[in-house]
Image: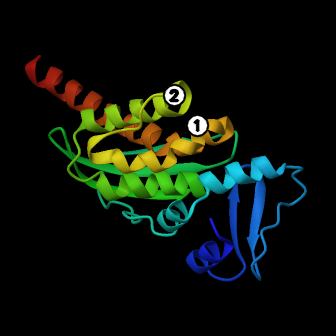
Amino acid sequence: MAVGDVAAALGPDAKVRGHALYYRVRLGNWKGTGTGLSGEDMAGLDEIYNTKLVELAADIPCSERVQSPDATATAHSKLCGSTVTIDLNMSGDTVSGYGQLVKACLLGQAAASIVGRHIIGATAQEVRDAGAAMRRMLKDEGPPPSGRFAELELLEPVKHYRARHGSVLLTFDALEKAISEIEGRRATARQSASG
């Protein structure tokens, strides 16, 4: 990715945090801050911090909280400090409302952005399947998610950077918690009604 592309996407003097270093985009220079990374490592970082992911991270949809969510869940990565909080409404088994507060690195923001673009109308099973596919893609060399969440394929190069896996998966961790909470509450209500 050309530095000019990053500068254009983020504006002058923008800071992007990721992979234990800060990139400063200023006057056309990339500068790692004392990381000791080799040229090969930097080439790999160029692969994961590409223009499309920068654009996605800069434009996260559903960034407003939901007024009366059926569930709210937070996921936090202790390794990198990223946090994602989501609000979720479901009509039956289908996502009908979604809001997210994303305080994450560029990769976590990009993942949240992709999910936010495709989440409304997704079923609980589609969300769980996409989360499972992401975990297999990152940890077990599995194929990327397909269907509604196929755009997550853009994050496939992250599989080589284990320290970034947690941040990329935060949105799914929070979604799965929220869906389980909603389903659990509904099951309890059904039991109470029948007993």
Furthest-top residue in view? 195
Q: Residues within 10 Å of mark 2 (few under 14, many from 20)?
A: few
The residue labelled by disc 1 is 159
**Residue appearing at x 48%, y 58% in the figure:** 101
Q: What is the total number of numbered labels drawn onto the structure image?
A: 2
Q: Is residue 96 above or below residue 156?
A: below
Secondary element under disc 2, as helix, strand or loop, is loop
Task: Kindly identify the amino acid type of the residue bearing the numbered disc 1.
Answer: Lys
Please tell me which of labels 1 and 2 falls first in the chain: 2
**Residue nearer the viewer, 78 or 167:** 167
CB atoms at circles 1 and 2 under 8 Å apart?
yes
The residue labelled by disc 2 is 141
Taking the image as drawn, is residue 166 in sight?
no
Pick the quarter of the image with the C terminus: top left
Is 151 on the left or on the right of 27, as rendered? Answer: left
Pick the quarter of the image with the N terminus: bottom right
Task: Kindly identify the amino acid type of the residue bearing the numbered disc 2.
Answer: Glu
Q: CA distance from mark 1 to mark 2?
A: 8 Å
Quarter where residue 158 is shown: top right
Q: At which x and y percent is residue 34?
A: 90, 56
Taking the image as drawn, is residue 47 in sight?
yes
Q: Residues within 10 Å of mark 1 (few under 14, many from 20)?
A: many
